[in-house]
Amino acid sequence: MTDKGEKTNGVREILVMGVFWRILFIEAVLLAYSLGYRWLIEGAGPMELFWYAIRIMVLVGIIVVFMVVSLKRFLTKKIIDPLEQIAHANRQIENNFSKADTIDLPADTPDEFKTIVSTRANMLERIIRVSDQRLQLVKFIKDTFGRYLSQKVVEEILSSAKGRQIGGTRKTVTVLMADLRGFTSLSESRDPEAMVQLLNRYLKQMSAIILAYDGIIDEIIGDAILAVFGAPEPHENDPQRAVACAIKMQNRLANLNKELMDEGYPALEMGIGINTGSVIVGNIGSDLRMKYGIVGETVNRAARIESNSIGGQVLIGESTYRSAQHQIQTDSPKTVMMKGMKKPLVFYPVFAIDMEGKNICLDVTAAPGPLLEIQIPFHCWIIQDKKLDLIPISGITLALDETCVLIRTTTAIELLTDVKLNFDFCLEAHCFDDIYAKCIHSEPVRDSHHARLHITAMTEKDRKRIKEWMTQASA
């Protein structure tokens, strides 16, 4: 290894000059010895010594020239040329690795050089084999763990030792939470293998959209997806990309539902909540078990926003709205007081965004037809934190279809409250199972309260029965 700018010589110059100076030194010693011997032993005079020295120097010059020329040819053929070929082949590795093992040596090359060439070839073969195995291993790791983590996260973890250390950094990100409505109850009445295949179809299509908008999937929890925009690499338009991604996800689900219904499956409904804020991003856990993820109030708030959505909705928090308000179209903000919060949760239903000059809109669903006016007594229970109130609320239906129910109760049901309905209707022909819904409108009427419930989960047989009633009523 030499410093930059330092002049170096090749083996050709070193060998030739080394031989030349050594021969010259030997001849100089012999000349001094011969002159000293003539002067001290034979008593030669100055002139005689002078001409004697001239004759010796001419002879030495002839010998030096002969030795240098003949040795140069010999060394070039036997040593220098083989070494230069090996050096040239080594330099070829940088430009064309496939030709690095091509070295043609003459048959009379010394055995030591042939051994170097053969050893070098074996070494290169091993290096190539090990390099291929390493590349295949790295590719396998990235491809395999890229299915459990984002490819960007895998690359960050593998790029350095710090990527595997426990800890994180504080970053501002946009969190997207998506969850299917009623999938759990649907799974209880269907073949498990078929439901897993259905869920995988849904997750595959949603994941492709998230990755297309440069988000990472932090977790898949059953039928829920937690995605992050802005980690590990932040972008200036993280909130906008998250909103555009959510709209695309809802539109893609609408197309997927057409396929599912043709195959005999019920349509799926998905709610999405988005929130922007500060989180801790990094490796969470211990030396025994860790995961790359995000932690912070921003994640919890995104989940709470999502819990207030109904199928087909995209709801965004205040911080996301402030970041993208000049590019998005929303309905008026909604507020709800949730357990454990010191102030109302504010969110906006989004239905369009202008992304890089392209307007991305939620697909407009067909306007609902007239409801079936029917009075069925029921009991309902308010759901809070996935727990049912012990005391039921009694009421009666005013009208319904397979997606919503208009009800009258003596007790008010707050807006965006989740409820479980149980119709007091059970004949030999049909008995209704539990129905889950969310209150999307509530108002007092005289001495009672009217509410509109959006159905989030209903068994297929109940849905089919309501459709039959509506068909019979319209005939």
Image: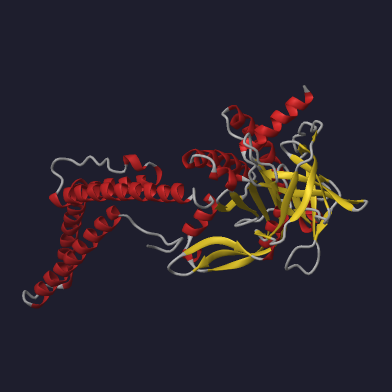
Most foreground residue, 153 or 3: 153
Q: Taking the image as drawn, is residue 355 in sight? A: no
Name the residue at 63% across, 40% down: 431
Q: Is residue 436 above or below residue 360?
A: below
Q: Percent x, y for residue 139?
A: 42, 47
Q: Percent x, y for residue 66?
A: 17, 51
**Quadrant the N terminus occupies:** bottom left
Q: Is residue 360 above or below residue 448?
A: above
Q: Is residue 74 left or right of residue 352?
A: left
Outermost residue toward the front? 428
Outermost residue toward the right? 446
Q: Taking the image as drawn, is residue 33 in sight? A: yes
Q: Is residue 392 left or right of residue 258?
A: right
Q: Is residue 7 left or right of residue 336?
A: left
Most foreground residue, 32 or 3: 3
Q: Percent x, y for residue 273?
A: 71, 52
Q: Percent x, y for residue 202?
A: 58, 40
Name the residue at 49% across, 48% down: 147
Q: Is residue 225 left or right of residue 288?
A: right
**Quadrant the C terminus occupies:** top right
Outermost residue toward the left? 42
